[in-house]
Image (cartoon, helix red, strand yellow):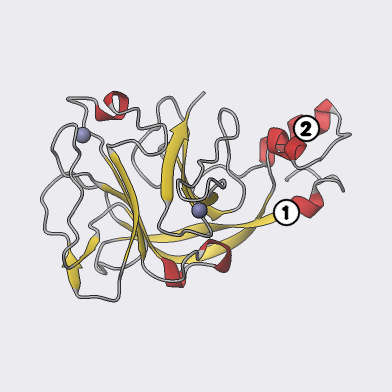
Amino acid sequence: MPHAIPDAVIPHRRTAYRPDVVEGDDDPKASKLGGTPWLPEGTTHPVCPNCNHPMPLLLQLDVATLPDPARYGGTGLLQLFYCTNAEPLCEVDCEAFFPNAKSVVARRVDSTTKGAASAVEGERFEAKRIVGWEATDDYPNWEEGEELGITGLDDATIDALGEDWPLTGEKLAGWPAWVQGIEYPECTECGEPQALVFQIDSEGLLDYGWGDMGVAHLTQCSAHPDHLSFGWACG
Ligand SMILES: [Zn+2]
Ligand SMILES: [Zn+2]
């Protein structure tokens, strides 16, 4: 049973969307975690510049099918690639927890042109196709709430809210479950903080851990939808 939401917090409710997934990778352009990306003609499967291995796909989202708050740009496929090589340990060499690391590619590609599923051999995460989204309420963490002007809550209430919110696990939109401080990357075009598109938890739908049970976030500028970032933090 979730704790009651104080009146001061209610106006900051957002809708987050939990992905419903099925195993399998039969549709190359589908929204999915893991599996094989779809590549427009002329666009290559990203290769890690640190180890020269193809990067596995973590996430692909078909923008036009997403619930409204995360449909920035309206079309295309969002693709997130992340080098998981352990030898060398690219995640550490490239400081892949920070946005814009060179062992990470977060991009939007045109899905209306000719193209095909990537034929590149390499590491793959087990494919989980997203077949639907379940809407659920989400609320900010306390530090973010303070920045929004929420005051006057006692410690017990703050602790209780923190047990329920923001939602952990995988979700589209909503409020980021920050493990350290608030870390919205800035758009390199306009300098504005990017919006949360998708949160990936440790050992959830993807068989991967962000450091010691950290949480990762794919973010995007709402005004410049080709500017995406990815970062993670752990305790
Ligand atoms: Zn690498
Ligand atoms: Zn921007």
Instruction: Find disc 2 in the rendering and name its residue.
Output: 158
Residue 135 position within the rendered picture, expressed as x and y whole percent measured from the top left = 60, 62
Q: Tell me if 214 is positioned left or right of 87 in this view.
A: right
As drawn, 123 above or below 15: above
Q: Amino acid at mark 1?
A: Arg
The one nearer the camera, 91 or 211, is: 91
The residue positioned 25% from the left and 55% from the top of the image is: 35
- Of pointers 1 and 2, the one earlier in the residue sequence: 1
The residue positioned 21% from the left and 47% from the top of the image is: 124
User: 10 Å neighbourhood of mark 2: few (<14), some, or many (≥20)?
Assistant: few
The residue positioned 48% from the left and 27% from the top of the image is: 234
Q: Tell me if 12 is positioned left or right of 100 in this view.
A: right
Q: Quadrant location of residue 143? A: top right
Whether residue 164 is visible here, answered yes or no, is yes
Instruction: Find disc 1 in the rendering and name its residue.
Output: 13
Residue 96 position within the rendered picture, expressed as x and y whole percent measured from the top left = 35, 32
The alpha-carbon separation of the residues under discs 1 and 2 comes to: 16 Å
Q: Tell me if 106 is positioned left or right of 144 in this view.
A: left
The one nearer the camera, 114 or 33, is: 114
Mark count: 2
The residue positioned 52% from the left and 50% from the top of the image is: 190
As drawn, 151 above or below 135: above
What residue occupies the far front of the structure in this picture?
A: 190
The one nearer the camera, 131 or 100, is: 100
